[in-house]
Image (tube, rainbow, N blue to C red):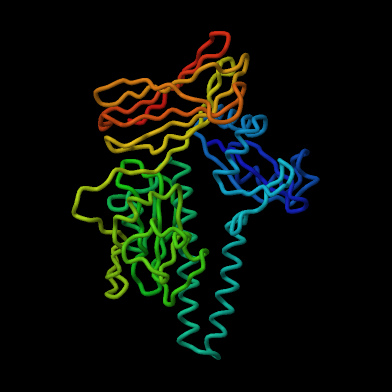
Amino acid sequence: MFYVYVLKSILNDQIYVGSTKNLKIRFKEHNNGKIISTKRYKPWKLIYYEAYTEEKLARMREKKLKYHGNAMKELKKRIGLINNGLPSTTFQKKAGAGFTLVEILVAITIVSTLIVGAAMTLNPAGQIAKSQDAVRQRDLQQVKLALDLYYNDRNCYPSPSDSPFAAALKDGAEWKEGDTVYMKKVPKDPARVSYVYTTESTACPQWSVVFAKLSKPSTLLTICSLMSQSNCVPKGFDTTWACVTSGNTGCTILASGEIDISGFSSGTGSGAISTPTSAPSAPVSDQDFFVAQPPEANPQFYEGTISPLFQQIGSNQKVTVNVAGAAADVASVSVTVKSDTKTQTYPATMTAGTSADGTWEASWTVDDTTAKRFMITLSGTDSAGISSTFDISIR
């Protein structure tokens, strides 16, 4: 794998963007002062990275982030970094983000030890319950880290029912895929039941949520970010549930299911969410994509979003794409959709930026299935009449 990464200086909040084949070694080199351009600002923290299967794709993405303002702006938006009047190269740290896994585990271990020690002299039952809830929240964070690593390797999250992760979650066993071990032991709830994992029922899920039942209710958003979204929680959800989310959560799907809490009372948790007996709705999660075209291509497509990736017949779908004119301004952009039985082209309209570097959007009403074939072709023409295309094969 090849990686594009973003570092933040602990010394002065300086931001550095780079690419590498071995992220772990490269990160150590930065903090050991072996990289001339960054040694003055060490120590550094890794706040974001992306994984690619080809070096040229990683190099293209690094250049986009460094030299295209829109690309960096969209990245900051996507990962939740906030810019409150700071220089364009300085990010504020998102609450709860930007720490290494070692720092997180050390901090949690210290806090857990203090809680256990106090439990013997204060209210034992109450303190033990608090300690168990702290363990649950720590476990959720560890599972989330493993799920995000899996996604970076495969561009999908695991299936909730027929995957090695689902089996390991149920048994509290090792989670291994091929030669990669994602968790030596998937944790189980202190009550010895499995945590609850759910995602969309597709061949390549693009979001996931893991739940844990707490001993006492809590209204803190840090316990579960879904608390702020009344239309994005399963039936049976209340303030006694903690959760971690990954990807752009499919609220419609999530709200149509019901958390199976029987395992938390009987000790035989299945780690799954039951769904209604009526026909399931189509997944509604968005899918970001990045484009790596030859340097001589013009116009240059470099990133965008399919919203949603899969859609029901009769509902709206759209593609938003950032396009730059390398040699001349972009004159027109279109999106061609190849589905099971049809090939249809839709004109795009510029919604932001300029014709030299702007955001274009095309939308349509889905009128065909995509069970066997689903391909999107981006086409652009500049003011000199030069054209370029890029295919996105989804099925």
Residue beneath the point at 45% across and 63% down: 227
Query: Residue 52, relative to residue 81: is it above or below?
Result: above
Residue sitting at the far top: 385
Residue beneath the point at 71% across and 41% down: 89
Q: In terms of depth relative to the viewer, which is nearer, 376 or 147?
A: 376
Q: In which quarter of the image is residue 16?
A: top right
Query: Residue 310, relative to residue 135: is it above or below?
Result: above
Q: In terms of depth relative to the viewer, which is nearer, 87 or 112?
A: 87
Residue beneath the point at 56% across and 83% down: 117
- In the drawing, does residue 33 fall left or right of residue 202? right
Residue 101, image x, y percentages: 57, 57
Residue 1, image x, y percentages: 52, 37
Q: Quadrant of residue 322?
A: top right
Residue 61, image x, y percentages: 58, 32
- In the drawing, does residue 131 fall left or right of residue 69? left
- In the drawing, does residue 11 fall left or right of residue 256? right
Query: Residue 192, relative to residue 304: is it above or below?
Result: below
- In the drawing, does residue 5 fall left or right of residue 194? right
Q: How many marks?
A: 0
Residue 291, image x, y percentages: 51, 27
Looking at the rendering, in which quadrant would you find the C terminus?
A: top left
Q: In terms of depth relative to the viewer, which is nearer, 203 or 175?
A: 203
Residue sitting at the far right: 40
Query: Residue 218, relative to residue 6: is it above or below?
Result: below
